[in-house]
Image (cartoon, rainbow, N blue to C red):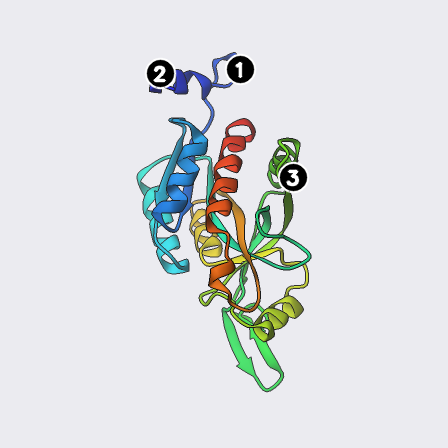
Amino acid sequence: MDRQAAAADDTASGGAERSRVLIVTAVAAERDAVLRGLNGSVRFDVIAAGAGTAAAAAGTAAALAAGSYGCVICAGIGGGFPGRAPVGSLVVASEMTDAGLGAETPEGFRSAAELGFGSVTVPAEHGTVQALAAALAAAGLAVSTGPVLTVSTATGTAGTAAALAARHPEAAAEAMEGHGVAVAAQRFQIAALELRAISNPVGPRDRAAWKINEALDALTAAAAILLEVL
């Protein structure tokens, strides 16, 4: 598709121009997977800001300061909680939560919110979450919704997985950037979403069993649906 045709497709009915969308990934492989699904759309800008919440927040803030956007999406692969998000499926976050910001106490982990240091969760807009999840399902893609946890250290043991699940029983997935992207978007008063394609279960680390290519393919398929929904 050439840029002129892409621009025409990015204009809503009645001639009104639809708002631009910023998509933030961590690494080039995720960025490229998203770009394949967007098929040349000029309404979406896709960046690879780096791994981790700090790089994600900084990259998002810099992009938002330089451009005008109606929505920000953190997109990439991640780990799925067994029973909530199987390998190869997609997760649309209902909220983005920093699962590690807090303190250890004699009674166990306490989040920064519990300690009175402010929220560790940024909610996604419910209607958009439901619309995107419904469109993904209608396209034949396996999808679930629920909180996506932002972690600095990917879970690698059954014990850590159990502790996370106990603190966040509704969590669907974990990744490393969503909360950083969402906080930056919140500062600019722009809606944020998180979309994850599941490459591995949250739990004991078995790198050889991860399905990264399959997850990237699912991410490409999901990106194509973004064109319809946003």
Left or right of residue 198: residue 6: left
**Secondary structure state at the residue bearing disc 2:** helix
Q: Between residues 115 and 34, which one lies in front from this camera angle?
A: 34
CA–CA distance in space, label 3 to label 1 = 22 Å
Residue 179: x and y in percent read: 48, 56
Sequence-wise, the earlier of marks 2 and 1 is 2
Q: Amino acid at mark 1?
A: Ser
Sequence-wise, the earlier of marks 2 and 3 is 2
Mark 3: few/some/many CA within 10 Å (<14, 14-19, 20+): some
Residue at image x 59%, y 46%? 89
| Residue 22 visible in the snapshot | no
Residue annotated with mark 2: 4
Residue annotated with mark 3: 130
Residue annotated with mark 1: 13
Q: Which mark is residue 65?
A: none
Residue at image x 63%, y 71%? 162
**Secondary structure state at the residue bearing disc 1:** helix
